[in-house]
Amino acid sequence: MTNLNSNTNRVYYLLQMKLKCDAEEAKSWIKNRSAKVTFELNEDKTISFEWFMSEDEREATIVETFVDSDGAKERVENLLASSISVSYTHLRAHETSQQLVC
């Protein structure tokens, strides 16, 4: 078991956020903005992009997996250049380090 995943170049992003808005509003933003834009980026080195809501719907978690660091870098560059960055930046304008403000 010492060699488990030792030869992988995969990169993972794990972002956990406390929601300060209504859960339905957050779900709508995730589905209609975040997931839609990310899907449309059509990045070859993205393996997965998943959102999860906590059972009490007070937190949201994004888990992203990339083939390698080039894929992770491409995601950041593409998102910063996309229409979602303005929306996300606006949502985060008053957030603390772990809060998503809607």
Image (cartoon, rainbow, N blue to C red):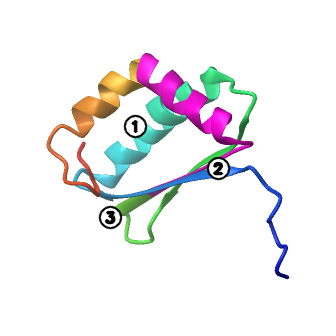
Q: Nearer the viewer, residue 12 or 36?
A: 12
Q: CA–CA distance between discs 2 and 1?
A: 25 Å
Q: Is residue 79 magenta?
A: yes
Picture mark count: 3
Whichever of labels 2 and 1 marks the residue nearer the N terminus, that label is 2
**Residue 73, percent from left and from top:** 57, 33
- SS of the residue under disc 2: strand
Q: Is residue 78 visible?
A: yes
Label 3 residue SS = loop
Give how far apart the Cα atoms at labels 3 and 1 are. Answer: 15 Å
- Residue under label 3, please give it: 58
> Is residue 1 placed above or below 101 in the rendered structure?
below
Question: What residue type is disc 2 on?
Answer: Val
Q: Nearer the viewer, mark 2 or mark 3?
A: 2
Query: The disc labelled 1 sits on which kind of residue?
Result: Trp
Residue 11 is marked as: 2
Tell me: residue 42, above or below residue 27: above
Name the residue carrying label 1. Answer: 29
Residue stretch in magenta: 61-81
Classify residue 4 as left or right of residue 12: right
